[in-house]
Image (tube, grey):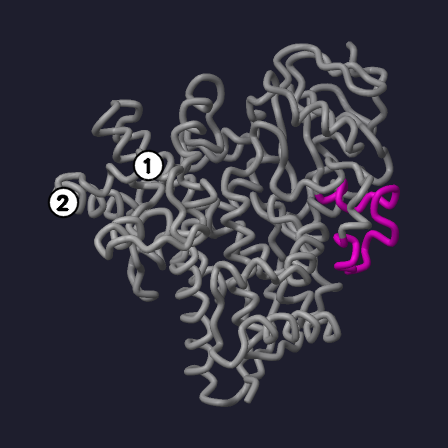
Amino acid sequence: MMLAIFLGPHEYPIIGNLYHFRIENEHLLEKFWRLSNEYYPIYKLWILIFPLVVLLDPEDVKELLKSNEHIKKAAFYKYLKPWLSYGLLTSSGKKWHLRRKMLTPAFHFNMINYYFNNLNEESRNLVESLKKEGDGDPVVKDLRTFISQYTLNAICQTAFGTKLTGKSKLESEYRNAVHVYGKIFAYRLVRPWYFYDKIFAFTPLGRIIAERKRFHKQTNGKYLQIYENIEEEDTFNKGKEKDDENRQNKKRLSLLDLLIAAFWKDNQIDEEGIREEVDTFMFEGHDTTASALNFALSLFAKHKDIQENIRDEVKSIMGEDNNLTISSFQELSYLERCLKESLRLYPSVHLISRYISKDMQLKHYLIPSKTMCIVNIYGVHRNPEYWPNPNVFDPDRFLPENIKGRHPYSYIPFSAGPRNCIGQRFAMLELKLFVAFILYNFKLEPVDELDDVTFVADATLTSSKPLRVKFIPIA
């Protein structure tokens, strides 16, 4: 067996290394990270019949992620399929290539600009809800529960053209389904014999699709025509005046519109395909962002000096009118560095994996075919060779002079290569807007200590206990 040359923890016949992970969920990731530190930069695991190789060296990670050949997701992702079926996250081969090409225009630079107003509005809604609840007094919030309400609404407005009320049955059922599924997903990673029903059958996302289809039928599909010229026009960047109707049309564009257009005009996707992608982007577009904000705001609450620096930068750009524009927004360079450093320490997607269909040569090892390769992003981001004092929060790591010469695959919060995150620019836009408005209006103080947090094995990085922050209004 070619994997015999790899180091790794002791294994037993049949069960392999499974016994290492017969522990409580909140200790699974800690165990995995300890093994990664012990066997750095590469090691093997056996989980029943599955051979795994864990990669931690950025040079090895580069060979895997840059490949156009090894793009099939590993077997772990099949536990997401009862929910997401074969959408962009879980599909492979020709289907993945077609869907990726189909959906890329939804995240074109021009489209990101059009989403700006929706995200701006949702950021203001979050701030106003905090002010109303506190009525001038500080408010303590469990970040993950609180923030996810607004990231869910943000993805619905921008990607699906649907505005939620904040109290609808759709929202409460969906958030509960995400929570339940996350636990089952983690449980089955180390307990493959654990069975469950197709729990996402009850998620009522069909209403969103049906309402959007109805809208396009009533308007004779005229808004779908705009996609043909989307790359030729950029209202925000070029500053050209357009007629009111055209501007209103463009504001209605969404990812869901692309799917409907592909269904009606080109027959590139069917009804099931639309549902797959709506499910996929509903999850990826709100849960990962909520995770990122959860840890970013906790870090800013802990580091008062950095919080003040961000606030000063935001104030200098917002001015007295408490407003951000797409052009002034680009000047928030310090905030962007802080968010990048937060994502280094706490990447929302902390682990990715690929199925190796044919032998793959790395720097020092040959990975045999039919192996699952795991990239421990959390471990890569804390490698002291590339990140001195890796556990220290230091936004200056992302100053231009410090970025220069650093291995590009030592920092991959949005993955990399052909299967990188299609919505990473959208995600950074959303993160910056939410944080900018929050820190402009509130001072943050920690209630729970970030250093004491443990993590559950979930699809996204999730703290085992609430992370609460006190929001203190700025007079």
| Dominant secondary structure, magenta | loop
- Residue 99 coordinates in the image, percent (x, y): 41, 27
The answer to whether marks 2 and 1 mark residues whose Cβ atoms lie closer than 8 Å is: no
Where is residue 356 drawn, in percent x and y?
A: 64, 17
Tag 1: Cα neighbours inside 10 Å, few (<14), some, or many (≥20)?
Answer: few
The quadrant of the rendering that contains the C terminus is bottom right
Q: According to the image, label 2 marks what residue?
A: 219
Q: In the image, is residue 123 above or below residue 17?
A: below
Amino acid beneath label 1: Asn
Residue that mark 1 sits on: 229
- Pick whichever, 165 or 189, lies toward us: 165
Percent across and percent down for residue 78 are 50, 29
At mark 2, the secondary structure is: loop
Relative depth, front residue between 450 and 69: 69
Q: Amino acid at mark 2?
A: Thr
Q: Which residues are magenta?
A: 378-399
Residue 83, quarter of the rendered image: top left
Q: Disc count in the image?
A: 2
Q: Which quarter of the rendering shows the N terminus?
A: top right
Is residue 159 left or right of 243 when viewed as pictured?
right
Q: Residues within 10 Å of mark 2 (few under 14, many from 20)?
A: few
**Residue at horizontal 67%, vertical 74%?**
446
Residue 303 magenta: no
Q: Secondary structure at mark 1?
A: helix
Residue in the picture at 88% in, 42% down: 385
Let me know if residue 176 appears in the view.
no
Query: Is residue 5 among what the camera can see?
Result: yes
Alpha-carbon distance for marks 2 and 1? Answer: 19 Å
Give the left or right position of residue 249, taking residue 304 as reference.
left
Residue drawn at x 76%, y 39% is 410
